[in-house]
Image: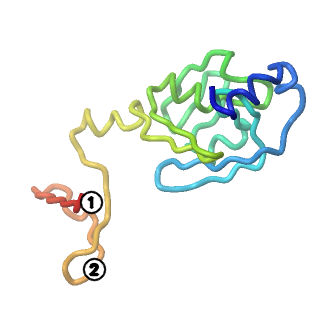
């Protein structure tokens, strides 16, 4: 058992959820970082305020579930406690990969959100500089055939 798990496990769960904390966390998702000033400590989960959820991943907590645009994912009551939302529990429910290290939580793509690309066979838009340094968007080639070649040094 590592030190962090021991310290959190040694305090009772009731005491952990009894009073708000000023612990901070940084959440990385979709090419941006969001610093959260208030989180609830937990041994394995990241609890954020429901009001902060739209800043993190564009979802809003509604009576019908966690909603983003026209997509709503039902959430069990165990994922909410008052104003708090279990972000990692939601990630597990949507099969979203995540990892944490020293207060920084990194979340991968949400499979159900990117599903429209798989069904439509349309690649997501991205921008890269061409050989002359001008920024070119993939969307500039919509309706035309395009060959995208990538390379990495590793």
Q: Who is closer to the viewer here, 124 or 128?
A: 128
Residue furthest to the bottom: 132
1 up-or-down from 36: above or below: above
- Count residues near mark 2 (Cα–Cα under 10 Å), then give few for <14, some for 14-19, many for 20+: few
Figure coloring: rainbow
> Mark 1–mark 2 contact, CB under 8 Å?
no
Residue 32: where, in percent of width, then height?
Answer: 53, 56
Q: Which residue is mark 2?
A: 134
Q: Which residue is mark 1?
A: 139
2 up-or-down from 133: above or below: above
N-term-proximal mark, 1 vs 2: 2
Q: Quadrant of the C terminus?
A: bottom left
Tell me: 101 left or right of 8: left
Residue drawn at the location 68% of the way across and 16% of the way down: 78
Instruction: Report which quarter residue 143 is drawn in.
Output: bottom left
Residue drawn at the location 65% of the way across and 40% of the way down: 53
- Count residues near mark 1 (Cα–Cα under 10 Å), then give few for <14, some for 14-19, many for 20+: few
Instruction: Report which quarter residue 66 is drawn in.
Output: top right
Eye-nearest disc, 1 or 2: 2
Mark-to-mark CA distance, 1 and 2? 15 Å
Tell me: 26 left or right of 117: right
Q: How many marks?
A: 2
Instruction: Report which quarter residue 84 is drawn in.
Output: top right
Q: Quadrant of the N terminus?
A: top right
| Label 1 SS | helix
Q: Who is closer to the viewer here, 67 or 96?
A: 96
Residue drawn at the location 57% of the way across and 55% of the way down: 33
Residue 150: where, in percent of width, then height?
Answer: 18, 59
| Label 2 SS | loop
């Amino acid at each position: 058992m590592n030190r962090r798990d021991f310290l959190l496990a040694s305090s009772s769960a009731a005491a952990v959820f009894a009073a708000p904390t000023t612990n901070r966390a940084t959440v990385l998702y979709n090419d941006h970082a969001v610093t959260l000033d208030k989180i609830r400590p937990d041994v394995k989960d990241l609890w954020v305020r429901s009001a902060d959820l739209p800043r993190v991943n564009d979802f809003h907590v509604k009576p019908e579930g966690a909603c983003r645009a026209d997509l709503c994912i039902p959430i069990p009551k165990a994922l909410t406690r008052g104003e708090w939302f279990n972000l990692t529990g939601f990630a597990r429910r949507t099969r979203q990969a995540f990892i944490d290290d020293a207060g920084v939580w990194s979340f991968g793509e949400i499979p159900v959100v990117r599903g429209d690309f798989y069904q439509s066979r349309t690649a997501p838009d991205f921008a890269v500089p061409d050989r002359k340094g001008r920024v070119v968007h993939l969307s500039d080639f919509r309706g035309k055939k395009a060959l995208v070649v990538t390379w990495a040094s590793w």
